Image (cartoon, rainbow, N blue to C red):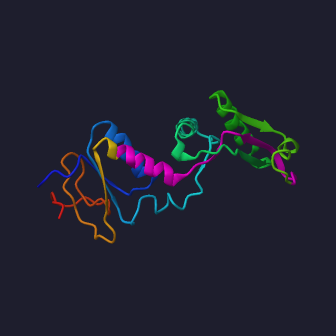
Amino acid sequence: MAHIADVLIVGAGIVGAACARRLSERGLSVVLLEREAMPAAGSTGRSAAGVRVQFSEALNVRLSAASIEEYRAMPQAAYRPIGYLFYVPHGQWAAHREAAIMQQRLGLPVQVLEPAEATRIVPAKTTGFAGATFCGADGCVDPHGITLAWLAQARAARAAKVRSERHAAPRPVAVRHGVRGSPFSGRPTGSAARAG
């Protein structure tokens, strides 16, 4: 059986493009299969494309902060720091405030506000809210621009090929190092299969 690629990625959305880019940077050959006629036509293209650091887990905060820094330097991302404001009800305030303090400890510009202060950013009736948080670095990006830029970077490394397999029926593939099976079903096959 002919060697097709070191890595087969199913889906040429923003995640598939990111994987192709990083793998090609490491010298691996990559083939992306996309069922649509163009990249970023599935969930990536339907995304609201919001980016924010206001999460409750430190790992998610760090990942998001690193992503936002990359988007700032990437013209194709069209990053716009419009800010995210969260009004938080009394029952959720303690946990939300604790998360905001963690975000601040990580060096992020998250503000903890009284509801009345938050109305200067976004006017609202504050009855029932214990507090608010705001981060001006939160914003939105262009997921199409990011996806296409990362695919171009992967191709520039001469390691990636994007193939449209529109309406193609799933078929088993042979995997040299790893689990054998259909990439579409997630179920291992009984014996080594050849791409056909």
- Is 18 situated above or below 101? below
| Residue lying at 67% horizontally and 37% vertically, measured from the top left | 99
Let me know if residue 141 is in the magenta part: yes
Task: Name the residue nearer the viewer: 15 or 45.
Answer: 45
x then y, percent, for residue 185: 32, 63
Let me know if residue 26 is in the magenta part: no
x then y, percent, for residue 79: 60, 44
- Is 102 situated above or below 176? above
Position of 36 compared to 118: left or right?
Answer: left
Q: Quadrant of the N terminus?
A: bottom left
| Residue lying at 58% horizontally and 53% vertically, measured from the top left | 49
Q: Quadrant of residue 23?
A: top left
x then y, percent, for residue 75: 53, 43
The residue most toward the left is 1
Q: Quadrant of residue 69?
A: top right
| Residue lying at 58% horizontally and 38% vertically, measured from the top left | 61
Position of 117 compared to 72: left or right?
Answer: right
Task: Name the residue nearer the viewer: 111 or 165.
Answer: 165
- For the image, the number of numbered tags is 0
- Is 169 situated above or below 107? below
Q: Quadrant of the C terminus?
A: bottom left
Q: Which residues make up the magenta segment?
A: 125-154
x then y, percent, for residue 170: 28, 67
| Residue lying at 46% horizontally and 63% vertically, measured from the top left | 41
